[in-house]
Every structure is written in C-alpha cells, then in structure tokens.
Amino acid sequence: MDSANEIRFVAEMTLGKLSKWLRILGFDTVYAANVAGEKLIDTAKGRILLTRTKRIRNMNIAKERIFISSNHPFEQLREVVLALGIAKEDIRPFSRCIQCNASIRWVEKNAVRGKVPDYIWETQDAFHTCSHCRRIYWSGSHIQRSRDIIKRLFK
C-alpha cells in the first residue's frame, strides 16, 4: 500500500465521523457535507469516493469508490482499511487538521501563549498548529485514547 500522502478520499455527508478518523490517521479526506449525487461524484476527482448511497454504489462510473455499510464509525474505518489493504506503516497519525484537512506543523511553545488555556500552556511542551485554520493541537488524554483505537484497528 502507498503512504497516507497518496491515498486521498472524499466522503459524503453521512460520513463525517469517518472523515475525522481518516484525517486522524493522516489521510487527505474531503468531507462533502453539503454535496450530494452527481456533484459528489464530480468532487471525487483523483480521490476514492466513500459513500453509503446505494444509488451511487450501483452507478456505472469510472471513479474508485467504497460502499460503507456500517453505521458505526470504528467499523466504517475498518471497512476502508480492509478494502484498501492499509497497514499501520501506511498511516501518519495526527499529521492533519481534523477540522479542515490541512497539514499540521510543529510550533514554538511561546507562539501559542494566550491562545490555549493557561493550564495547558504550563503543562504541555509540544504544540502543533494547522497551516490553514490555525487550530492548535497538543498531546492530551484524547491522543492516548486515539492511539488505543488505532492499535485495535490494526490488530
């Protein structure tokens, strides 16, 4: 399997949590929240289309697509991983903004002073920021929970 940089997705509006988890794994994932039908198919240029819409699944289109059958985000993620044969080595966890999909980068601690809660600034040493929406990330308890989920995913 190729690296996370080369696998790109577009997910329809019913797959918001799956989109978030694909971004957590480091995959470029467009979440088409307000796009449906033919426009969704057009949006998928150069991307793997993730859909729960049976009509799209059954369409004779040239685009690569994965029909997601589960209602549960973790199982949806497992469906994508299995369909593409993604291995743990193919992912780059926590390298994309879960909000806007842009890459995140390391930032000096002093650059986030006053932009994060005081307790966080005092207790954390490493910070990252989104290159597009400027959201700030740090390694809180949510990171360990996410790592545990990722570990289960690749067992």
Image: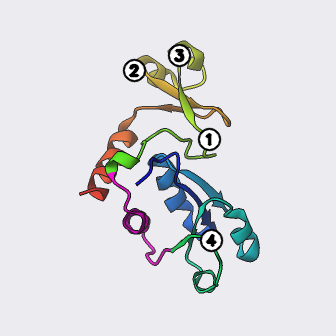
Q: Determine the CA span between mark 1 and mark 3.
A: 19 Å
Tell me the crowding category of disc 1: few under 14, some 14 to 19, or many 20 or more residues within 10 angstroms, Cα based: some
- What residue does disc 4 label? 63
- Quadrant into which the C terminus falls: bottom left
Q: Amino acid at mark 1?
A: Ala
Q: Determine the CA span between mark 1 and mark 4.
A: 24 Å
**What residue appears at the point 49 percent right and 25 percent down from the top-left corner?**
127
Q: Is residue 102 magenta?
A: no
Q: Where does residue 52 sit, x and y in percent of width and height?
A: 55, 77
Disc nearer the start of the sequence (1/3):
1
- Residues in magenta, as a range: 67-87
- What residue does disc 1 label? 102
Q: Determine the CA span between mark 4 and mark 3.
A: 42 Å
- What residue does disc 2 label? 123
Q: Amino acid at mark 3?
A: Glu
Q: Is residue 76 magenta?
A: yes
- What residue does disc 3 label? 108
Tell me the crowding category of disc 4: few under 14, some 14 to 19, or many 20 or more residues within 10 angstroms, Cα based: some
- Which residue is nearer to you in this view: 124 or 37? 37
The residue mark sitting in front, 1 or 4, is 4
Q: Amino acid at mark 4?
A: Lys
Is residue 26 shown above or below 41?
above
Disc nearer the start of the sequence (2/4):
4
